[in-house]
Every structure is written in structure tokens, then in C-alpha cells.
Image (cartoon, grey):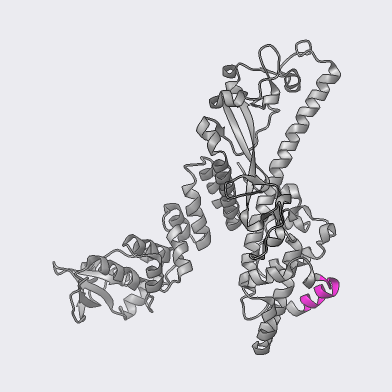
Amino acid sequence: MTTTASTPSLVLADPTELVIGENIRTDVVITDDPEFVRSIAERGVLTAISATRRADGTLRIIDGQRRILAAREAGLSAVPVLVDAESDDERQAQIDRVTGQLHTNEQRAPITTRHKVGAVTELLDLGLDVERVAKITQLGEKFTRTAATAGRSAKVDDHLADRRLTLDDAAILAELETAADRYPAIPDRIERILGGYGISYHLAHLREDVAAMDAATAAATEHAQRGFTVIHNEPSTTGGDWFTPADLRTPDGKPIPDDAPHSAPHLWHVHPSEAGVVWVDADGHEVDDTLIDWDTRDDPDLEAIDGLIRADAVTKTTSWSFEFYLHHSRRADAGFALAPELAAAGGDAGDAEDGLSPSQRAAARAEAERKDADRAQRRRTIALNRAGGVATEMRRAFLTGLLSAKSAPKNTTRWVVGVLARHPSLLTEFKAGELYGSITGTDPTTAAAKVAKATAGQCEVLLLARVLTAFEARLTGTQDSKDYWRYSEKSYRGLQGIDTYLTFLADAGHTLSPVEQAAIGNTTVDAAYATLDDD
């Protein structure tokens, strides 16, 4: 790389003749800032504009877009310009332009998150890697990586412009847009989220939905390759649109063969669902957990008991079940009739045609309704548990930020004394110590050493950290349960004081999600479920 060495020179130039080059700010409307224009009209441009002199003699602006626009609006005839020769290396010149525009000065409006994201994207497009961009922009690697994801979406840019999204929200939105090709309902869900409240929570929940659908799609790969259509929501079979193999009969009235779906996969849909956790060996074969010597898990030198295998020789994985459904539009092609019970339950056959007595017919309808209610309840539970997991992730991120502060919220000591008096076992139950470490990033045994050098405010934060992380452990239990939305009765599963805990977080700035509101009885579980858009 070569550049032309030169000494910058200060000149006066007509602002109307200056060429405004590319700028990380793409949304400047100078008339929206009349005070700035008035200041330029009265005082002139006090900080010289930076420019390069191009081969044709024109001056291309590197830094000072707003000042030029304001000078033009104010009718100034000359502005100070610090002129340097244009770089021989155009790529380096572009890098210098972007990084230079990130730095503020007294006559510039603050650089917004949108501008920073645009700068990161442009530098990455110029061939720099994330580490280099983070260094030369001084934005930090975490910000740069997140911006690298967020900056690929025009929709994200629009919403960053109106400042309704955080950078993390923007990155999630950009990720979700890539899922639209796989799941056609995603764009509509995004629009509903962006038009409502609780954007951060609902975007995170949608991301979890997409992750779950991706996992189910991967689990059903072999079925898809055979010709089955994968569906992610378990369908209702009482409306006459969907049928299970048990709902169907051959033309002569017999149950359809067990392999009927596999004999004509192009006619059938398959619904994959998580069936639980299993252990598999290196070859992928399932291993009964009673055949695993769990004592070897933390001791690499310990030999397994005869007949058992070492714990480090197996891997935990999710097992899947697959249910098959036939849509009513394909029943004629499949050549199947409805079971009499289903015909009766759906009213598709008259009393004389279905061959059932009135009591049998009523029982058939009741059984169909029960099955459909079970499916609806299963879907509701899955959605609420997923929402509980999202809420836990966001709540713990809030805790990490809250407990990294140098001082605690107002009245913290009064609150801590009160809850410890009412819940004396709080600090020793469940996995309070483990959560303290993961949320604060430090081992609880180091607290004593920290206290020796801490201010009174920092000591209060250390005490608050022990109490809040203990309450978090009480809320989710030893297995990081996601179903705490069930526990509006405070005494259920030892969840006393959870309402106090979540209310404290809300007062400290955390926005309680619907499932958290349900956990403490501020709303009903049905109302919380109604907020979840799970097309």
C-alpha cells in the first residue's frame, strides 16, 4: 500500500463547490436543526472541514457534512477547509474516511447507533475483519460483531433510524429476516412485533421459535427426503381438516395399515416433536442410562464397573417422535374413508349412516374433543415454556448489568434485610452459589476479599448479588426450569418471595414479561399465553 505524503493546507472555499463524499450519516436533513444553522450563520464554521484534493482539482469532503449543509443553508460564501492530497490507495482512503467520520467534534451531532452500524458494515465490506474494525473504530469487539449481523438488513437500518431498536434487537431482527425463506409466516410476525410493545422480548421469543423449528426440521430430514411435508404446529383433528392414521379406514372399513404413510409419503405430513433426552454412544446408538457408570463422570482415571460404560463415552441428545397427518384435500387420493367415530364426532354422517348408537356417538364426540383439547394444551405448554426460557435469558442479562454497577438501587439494604428475615434459608438452597458465579462472573468465595477493598456502595452491591441470584435459583430450581409461569400460588414448589424478587427487578428497571407477570399473579396464564404470537 502506498499513499502520497503531503502537508495539509488550510484554504477558504465556497461551500456550494465542495463535493460531499460518502458519509456514514445517510439521514441528515439540516433544516431539522435550525439552531445549528443559526449558529453557523452568526458565527461561521469554527472548526475546519476536512477534505482531499482530487486529481481534477475539486475538493471532496471527508469530515464536515453537516457544517457544509448548514453553511449552504445560511448562505455563507466561504468556509475553512483543511486540504490534504488524495490517497493513492483508494481502499485505505475509504477506511480512513469511515473511521474519521466516527470521531465527533464540537460542531457535529452525536453519532448514533445506526451510524456506527453503518460504519462497521462499510469497513467489513472493504475487506477488514471484525478484530481490525473493532480496533480502528474503538467500538469494541462485542459491539462490532453484533453490528456486523445487524448491518445486513435494510429493515434494521430503518428501525435503527427511528431508535425503537437496541443494537441487540437489531441483530436478532437481521437473523430473523434470513429465516423468512424457510418459514413464510416470519415476516408477518416481525411486522406485528415491530408494531407493538415489548419488542425486545417478542423478538427474542420469535428467535427461540425459529431455533425450535430449525431443530425439528433437522430431526425430520430423513422424512423430508422421503417426500413427507414437515409441519411444526400440531394440527387439530376435530375441524375436519386433518386426520391421523387412527381416524381413517380402508374402503372396506378396516383400519389402515401401519405403513400407510410410508407407502405414500407425498400425501402425508409429519409433525416432529421432542420426546425427551437420551444418551447415545460414539456410533449414535442409544444407551440405557442404567448402563452408564456415572461415578466416572468427574474422574478420568476411574475405571467403569464391569458391564457398565464410562460417562464420558456417551453424549446427551434430544430424541424425537414423529406423528403423521393427512390433510382432507388428499384423503380422496389416498383412498381412505373416515372411521365411524370420527364421522360421528364431526357430524359428517347421519345417525343411520355411522352405525353407532346415540351413546356411542356422544362418546365419540367427547373423545374427539378431549384429544383436541390435549393437543391445544400441549401446544400452550410448549409455547409458555419457551417464553419462560426467553424471559430467564433476558432477566439474567439484566441482573448481570445491575450487579456490575458501583452502587445498588435506592433502599436496597432495607429490602435485603426484610427478605432475609422472611426467607432465612434463601442463600443455601437450590444452586444459589452456582448462579451467583454465572451471573456475576465471579466465584462467591471471592466476596470476602472484595469487601476488604470495596466502598460502602460496592459492599451493598455484593450483598444484593447474593440475594438476587439466590432468588433466581429459587425461581428456576436446580434444573433451570422454564415453567415458573405456573406458580402464581406463592407456596407452590417453595416459590415464596418470588413476587418480591420480580417486583424489585421491575422497580430497578427490568420490564417483566407476561410469563413473569403470570408467575407472581399479576396476570393470568391464559392472558400471558394470549400475548404469544406462535403462528
Across and down, in percent, residue 203 comes to: 57, 53
The residue positioned 49% from the left and 42% from the top of the image is 182
The residue positioned 84% from the left and 73% from the top of the image is 424
Whether residue 421 is situated above or below residue 242 in the rendered picture: below
Residue 422 is covered by the magenta coloring: yes
Q: Is residue 140 left or right of residue 305?
A: left
| Res. 166 visible in picture | no
Location of residue 109 by image quarter: bottom left
Q: Quadrant of the N terminus?
A: bottom left
Residue 439 is covered by the magenta coloring: no
The stretch of residues the image draws in magenta is: 414-425
Location of residue 95 by image quarter: bottom left
The residue positioned 68% from the left and 27% from the top of the image is 239
Of all residues shown, which one is farthest toward the bottom?
Answer: 452
Classified by dominant secondary structure, the portion drawn in magenta counts as helix
Whether residue 166 is situated above or below residue 337 in the rendered picture: below
Q: Nearer the viewer, residue 443 or 373?
A: 443
Whether residue 414 is situated above or below residue 124 in the rendered picture: below
The residue positioned 40% from the left and 69% from the top of the image is 131
Across and down, in percent, residue 197 comes to: 60, 55
Q: Is residue 500 left or right of residue 93?
A: right
